[in-house]
Amino acid sequence: MNGECKRGCGGWRRLSQKSKKKKKDGIQSAFHVAIIGTVGVPGSYGGFETLAENLVTYAERAEGGAGITVYCSAPAFEDRAPCFRGARRRFVPLRANGASSMVYDAWSMLDALMRGSSHILLLGVSGALILPLIRIARKVLGRPRIVTNIDGIEWRRDKWSPLARAVLKVSEWAAVRFSDVVVADNKAVAEYVQARYGVPCVTIPYGGDHAVSATPHVENCKELPARYALAICRIEPENNVEMILEAGSGLGIPLVFIGNWDRSSYGRRLKAAYADNPDISLLDPIYEPGVLRAIRDRAMIYLHGHSAGGTNPSLVEMMHFGIPVLAFDCAFNRHTTEDKALFFRSANDLALLARGLGAADGNAVGRAMREIAERRYSWTLVGKAYFDLFRF
C-alpha cells in the first residue's frame, strides 16, 4: 500500500482551541508529526530511514493511524507516491545528505511549520541551526513541539573536514539548546549530553527485529562459503574496516564483508588491496531484506568495528540472530551489548578472539545477544517510546 492510504493520508489541520481537546486514546485531534532528516520512506539507506519507516508502521498498527508526514528527498525516489502505509510523503527537491543536508532539513522544517504540524521529529543535527527561528514562530502559533534525535557525536567522526566538524559542533549545541526533548540512541551519548550541556537526554535505541522477520532468499548465497564471519557497515575509517580486513586471513573461517566500497577513495583502496584475498569476499551494499536475512542466517560470528555513532542499527539487527558478536571496544558498543559481547582493539586481538572462540562460549555469547535484543531492541518498544514523547 505505497501509493494509496486507507485514511487518505489525513493531511494537516490548523490547531484551534477546540482541536486541542484530547481524544479518548490520548492523541490530540490535530496530532500530526513531521519526521525530518531522512532520505525518506520506504527506507533503503541507513538507520534513520529504517527508524522513520518503522514509526510509520507502528502508527498505522498501534496508534489508530495517528497523522505522520515523512519528508523525502525527491532525487532519491523514482516512485513519488503521496502516501506510504498511511503516512504522507512530502518531497523536497534536494539531496538529504552531504552539503545540501542543512538546507534540506531547514526547508522541511519550515514547510512543516507552515502546514500546521503539531510535532517535529528531527533526526540528526544538520538542520538544527534553524531551530531558534522555529521556536520564535512557536510563540505566535503555539506549535510545533520539537523532539530531536541527535544521533551520535557527529562532529567527532573522522570523515569530516575541520570546517564540517565546526559546523556540526555548533549544530549539536543548537539541537540541544532549542529542542523540547533531546533523544539519544545510546546511554553513552546521553551521558555525553548531560555532561557537556547539563541537559537531560532521553535514551531510545533502534529496533532490529525487522531483520529476522524477512523471508530469506537462499538462492543469493550459493557462491558464498558454507560458514563465515560477517561484517556489514559503511566503508569509513571510524568503522575500523581496515582493521577487520587485516584480521581477515587469521580468523580461522572466511570473512564476508558487505559495504559501499566504491563510494570513497578509502573504500576503493581497500577493495583493490583485498579483492584477491581467497579468505575474504567483498560484497557491494545489499538492501533487499530477504537477501540480507539469508546471508545473516549463515554467519557463524559477527564482526562490528564501529567506534562512533551511538547504537548502530547493524549491530542491534545482528544481535537478533543469536550468534557471537565481536565488537570494537568502545563505550557505545559496550552499552549496546551490556558488556556481553567479545571486544577487540586491534587486528591481532580480533584474530585471536575468533580463533580461540569455542562452541560452548560462542553459543553462550550468542544467546546473550539474542536475549538483550529481544528485551531492548524491538520496534514495538521503540515506537511506543517515541509516541509517549509526542503525547507528553
Image (tube, rainbow, N blue to C red):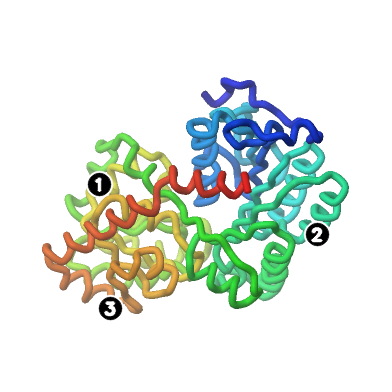
Residue 385 appears left or right of 12: left
Up/down of 12 relative to 99, above or below: above
- Sort mark 2 into few (<14), some (14-19) or many (20+) by Cα contacts within 10 Å: some
Q: Is mark 3 on a helix, strand or loop?
A: helix
Residue 354 in the image, given as x and y percentages of width and height: 21, 69
Residue 251 appears left or right of 319: left
- The three-letter amino acid code for the residue at tag 1 is Asp
Regarding residue 386, the answer to whether it shows in the image is yes
Of tags 3 and 2, which is closer to the observer? 2
Residue at 12% in and 67% down: 358
Residue at 28% in and 64% down: 277
Residue 136 in the image, given as x and y percentages of width and height: 85, 55
Regarding residue 241, the answer to whether it shows in the image is no
Residue 38 appears left or right of 347: right
- Front residue of 274/385: it is 385
Q: Distance between the residues labelled 1 and 3?
A: 25 Å
Residue at 32% in and 70% down: 339
Residue wearing tag 3: 349
Up/down of 223 relative to 66, above or below: below
Residue 2 appears left or right of 278: right
Residue wearing tag 2: 132
Residue wearing tag 1: 297
- Front residue of 55/47: it is 55
**Which circle's residue, 2 or 1, is located before the other in the chain?**
2
Of tags 2 and 1, which is closer to the observer? 2
Residue 190 badge: none
Residue 42 in the image, given as x and y percentages of width and height: 53, 37
